[in-house]
Image (tube, grey):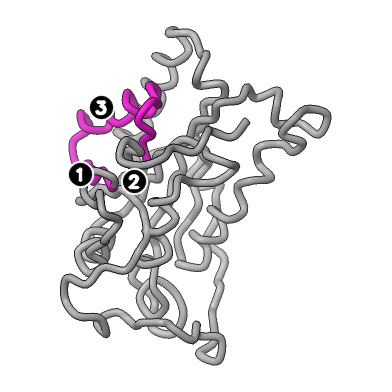
C-alpha cells in the first residue's frame, strides 16, 4: 500500500511501473469506497507468480485496506483450506517502510521488539496459502532518510524486482511448509470460490500486479491515515 505522504513508497511504486511484466493495482485508487471485486482480484492473483505487498508499516501492521483485501480475497476454498490451492507455488515479497529508525526496533527502545517480531503474520499468511515468503525489503526511518539512502533503496528494489526469480538466495529458502486446514475448521461464514455473485466485493485491501509479478499497494489519501509504526 502507499500512504498519501509516503514519499518513499511513491518512488518505489514509480520504479515498479518501469519494470516489464509488472502490473500494478493501487487499491485506494481502485476501491475508494472499500468495495472490492473479489472475483477480479482472484483472477489477477491467479495469473501472477510473485505477489509484492508494498506499503508503509502502520501501527506495527499493514494499512487497513490491505488487511481488508486479505480478509476477502484470500478466501477459504480458494487460497487455503479444502480445495484452496490457487496460490500454491507462488512467492510473496514484503516491501515496507517504517517511520521510526531501525534502532527503535530493539528491546531497549520504544518499539520494544526487533522488527522481525512483527513479520510472523505475513509469513504465516504466505504459508497458509502455500506461498513462499521471500526475504523482506525494509527501509527504516523513511521519514528522515537522506536522499542518497532513499535512492539506493529504490534502486535495490527495482533491481530485485526486475531480476526475479533469479535471486542468489532462492535456492537456500527451501520449500513452503505445508499448512493443511481440515474442513472441520472451515470458518463458519466461509464463502468458497465461485459461491458469491459475480462482481460482489467483500472487504479487504491489497494492490497487486498481473503477469509474472503481482505488486500490492494502496494510497491512504482517501481516508484517515494511521501513523507509521514508531
> Which quadrant would residue 100 be assigned to in this image?
top right
Residue visible at 37% across and 45% down?
52
Query: Pointer 1: what residue?
Result: 23
Measured from the top left, where is residue 140 in percent x and y? 56, 25
User: Dot 2 lies on which element?
Assistant: strand
10 Å neighbourhood of mark 3: few (<14), some, or many (≥20)? few
User: Dot 3 lies on which element?
Assistant: helix
Inspect the magenta stretch and tell me whether residue 72 lies in it.
no
In the rendered view, tell whether residue 188 sits above or below residue 26: below
In the rendered view, tell whether residue 226 sits above or below residue 36: above
Q: CA distance from mark 1 to mark 3?
A: 12 Å
Inspect the magenta stretch and tell me whether residue 15 lies in it.
yes
Task: Single out the residue that lies furthest toward the front.
Answer: 224
> Which quadrant would residue 46 be assigned to in this image?
bottom left
Task: Single out the residue that lies furthest toward the right.
Answer: 108
> Can you say which quadrant of the picture contains the N terminus?
top left
**Marks 3 & 2, CB-CB < 8 Å contact:** no
Residue visible at 52% across and 33% down?
227
Residue visible at 66% across and 41% down?
116
Mark 3 vs mark 2: which is more N-terminal? 3
> Can you say which quadrant of the picture contains the C terminus?
top right
Measured from the top left, where is residue 202 in percent x and y? 32, 68
Query: Pointer 3: what residue?
Result: 14
Range of the magenta residues? 1-27
User: Dot 1 lies on which element?
Assistant: strand
Q: CA distance from mark 3 to mark 2?
A: 13 Å
Amino acid at each position: 500500500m502507499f500512504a498519501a505522504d509516503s514519499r518513499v513508497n511513491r518512488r518505489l511504486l514509480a520504479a515498479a511501473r518501469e519494470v516489464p511484466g509488472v502490473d500494478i493495482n493501487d487499491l485506494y485508487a481502485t476501491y475508494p469506497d472499500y468495495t472490492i471485486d473479489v472475483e477480479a482480484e482472484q483472477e489477477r492473483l491467479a495469473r501472477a507468480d510473485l505477489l509484492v505487498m508494498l506499503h508503509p508499516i502502520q501501527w506495527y501492521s499493514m494499512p487497513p485496506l490491505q488487511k481488508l483485501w486479505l480478509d476477502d480475497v484470500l478466501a477459504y476454498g480458494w487460497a487455503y483450506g479444502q480445495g484452496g490451492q490457487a496460490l500454491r507455488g507462488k512467492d510473496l515479497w514484503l516491501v515496507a517502510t517504517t517511520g521510526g529508525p531501525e534502532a527503535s526496533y530493539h528491546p531497549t527502545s520504544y518499539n520494544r521488539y526487533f522488527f522481525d517480531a512483527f513479520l510472523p503474520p505475513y509469513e504465516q499468511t504466505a504459508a497458509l496459502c502455500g506461498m513462499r515468503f521471500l526475504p523482506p525489503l525494509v527501509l527504516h526511518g523513511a521519514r528522515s532518510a537522506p536522499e542518497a539512502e532513499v535512492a539506493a533503496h529504490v534502486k535495490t528494489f527495482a533491481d530485485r524486482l526486475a531480476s526475479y526469480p533469479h535471486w542468489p538466495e532462492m535456492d537456500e529458502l527451501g520449500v513452503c511448509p505445508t499448512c493443511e486446514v481440515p474442513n472441520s475448521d472451515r470458518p463458519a461464514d466461509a464463502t468458497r470460490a465461485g459461491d458469491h455473485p459475480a462482481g460482489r466485493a467483500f472487504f479487504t485491501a491489497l494492490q497487486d500486479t498481473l503477469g509474472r509479478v503481482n505488486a500490492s499497494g494502496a494510497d491512504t489519501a482517501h481516508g484517515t491515515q494511521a501513523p507509521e509504526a514508531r
